[in-house]
Amino acid sequence: MTNSLQPLADRIFYLPNVVNIGIVALAPDPVGGGRALLVDSGLDADYGKAARKACEALRLKPVAVINTHAHADHFGGNDYLARNCGVRVYAPAFEEAIMRYPELEPTYLFNGAYPIHELQNKWLMAKASPVHQVVEAGELAVEGLSAQIKPLPGHSRAQVGVLVAGVLFCGDAVIGEGTLEKYKIPFGADIARQIESIHALQAMKVERVVCAHGEPVSDVTAMAEANLAAIERASRAVREAVQTPGDASQVVARVGRILGLQHANVSQFYLFQSVITAYLAYLQQLGQARLELREQAALWSAV
Ligand SMILES: [Zn+2]
C-alpha cells in the first residue's frame, strides 16, 4: 500500500501515502543502534507497520512519534508502534486528550451525543494511543534531537507543526491541491485561527514544507494561496446561504448545493456539517452573521 521512502534532507525522510509520515534519523543509541523519530503515524496498524519497515530499511528503530494533531488519520498507527516498538508519544495539549479517548472525535462530530455506528469507523475513530509527553510551542528535546514545535491551530483546535533542520512537517495546516479539489473546503475547526496559521506558515523561513496530504514543497506560497482561496470561497458560500434565515441543517444543505458537493457517506456529511458550523461561528465573529432563537429553532441570518 505504501510507496518508497523519499529523502527530504540529510537524515530526514518521508513515507508518501494518502497520509504522509515523517521519519527523522536520531543519533544512534550506543547499545541499541539506530533510532528514528516519526512525525504522525497514519491511519491504522498498516501505516504503523509500513513506517516500522521503512525505518528498518534505514537500519533504524522507531523510538518516538510526535503527532501534529488528533485526527484519526494522523495517530492511528500509534497503537501498533507503541505495542511493537515501545515508541514514546509526544502530542499537543487538548489533542492529546482525544488521542487517549479517541471516541471523542465521533462524539464531537455528533453534537456531543454517543455517536451512531456509522461514525465509529477507523477514519474518525483511531485506536487509543498512550501519550507520554505533552508538547508546547518552542524547542523540544526528543532523544537527543532538538525539534521546534510551531503552533498551527485552526484545522484542529491545537495542531502543531514540527520543524527539524529546515524541514517543517505542518500536519494539515495546508493540504495539497488534489485533496483540496476533491473536498472543496479544507477541514477547519476555527477558521480565523486557520487563516492566521496559513499566514504564519508563509512567513516561516524553512527549506521544505511537508503537508500530510500532498507533495512536499520548497516554496509554500502557491499551496497557501490555494488553501486561502478555498477558505474564501467557502466563506462566500456560507454568507450566501444565510441570506435567507435558516437553521444549521438548512445552511449545511444550501452550502452543499452552492459548492456542488455530493457526500459519499454519512461520515463525510458529518465532517462537512462540522466545518460549516465553524464557518457560521467565524461569520458571527466577523459580524456578518447572527444567530437568533425563533420559536423552536436557532436561525442563522446575514447581518
Ligand atoms: Zn487533520
Image: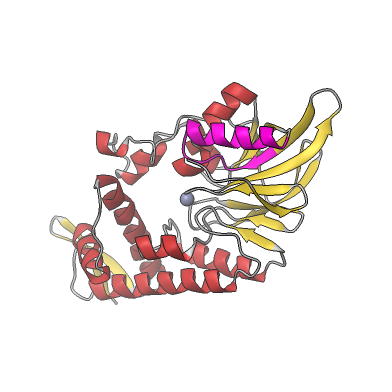
The range drawn in magenta is 37-58
Residue at position x 74%, y 48% in the image: 147
The image quarter containing residue 112 is top left
Q: How many numbered marks are there?
A: 0
Residue 144 or residue 149, whichever sits in front: 144
Left or right: 298, with 210 as reference point: left
Please tell me whether residue 185 belongs to the stretch shown in magenta: no
Q: Residue 87 at what x, y percent from top left?
A: 65, 29
Q: Quadrant of residue 219?
A: bottom right
In terms of depth relative to the viewer, which is nearer, 299 or 234?
234
**Coordinates of residue 265 in the picture (x, y in percent):** 25, 47
Q: Is residue 48 magenta?
A: yes
Residue at 53%, 69% in the rendered image: 223
Residue 116 appears in the figure: no
- Left or right: 295 in relation to 12: left
The quarter of the picture where residue 202 lies is bottom right
Give left or right: position of 62 versus 71. right
Residue 237 horizontal/vertical position (percent): 30, 72
Q: Position of residue 191 (x, y in %)?
A: 45, 63
